Amino acid sequence: MISWMDNQAAINQFLNEATSTKAKHIDVRLKHVRQYTDKGIIALTYVHTSKMLADLHIKAFSTPRFLQLRQLWQLRNWTLQVEDDTSASATTKKGALKGPKIRL
């Protein structure tokens, strides 16, 4: 599994054997990540902040930046068209209510 990170200090902290006194509270978690990287289960990979696609889910962006990240992620701008079906009855033969027709 590849873990893309935009924090080089965090990557170095995960990969280095020595821990600082400031990081003792996360020492156990660091050891687990180190074990997984040593076994090849996890690969910590640096990606520049401008290419961090996960930020699209957690940060607010200006429209140009949002569109740039969306394009990098190859997302498509879908528009929904809702049609009002007034000619049909409000219920189906089984008695369930009908909803509007939605087309992509």
Image (cartoon, rainbow, N blue to C red):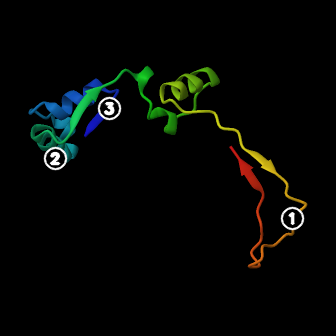
Residue at left 17%, top 44%? Answer: 27
Looking at the rendered structure, the secondary structure element under dot 2 is helix
Residue wearing tag 2: 32
Task: Work out whether mark 2 precedes mark 3 in sequence or the reverse, and give the earlier one.
Answer: 3
Most extreme residue toward the bottom, as rendered?
Answer: 94
Residue at left 62%, top 24%? Answer: 62
Amino acid carrying mark 1 in the image:
Ala
Task: Work out whether mark 1 precedes mark 2 in sequence or the reverse, and give the earlier one.
Answer: 2
Residue wearing tag 3: 4
**Front-lying residue, 83 or 23:** 83
Q: How many labels were placed on the picture?
A: 3
Looking at the rendered structure, the secondary structure element under dot 3 is strand
Task: State the image quarter where residue 39 is shown.
Answer: top left
**Front-lying residue, 8 or 82:** 82
Alpha carbon distance from label 3 to label 1: 52 Å
**Front-lying residue, 2 or 5:** 2
Q: What crowding class fits label 3: few (fewer than 14 Cα within 10 Å), some (14-19), or many (20 or more)?
A: some
Residue at left 9%, top 33%? Answer: 17
Residue wearing tag 1: 88
Q: Position of residue 102 (x, y in %)?
A: 73, 51
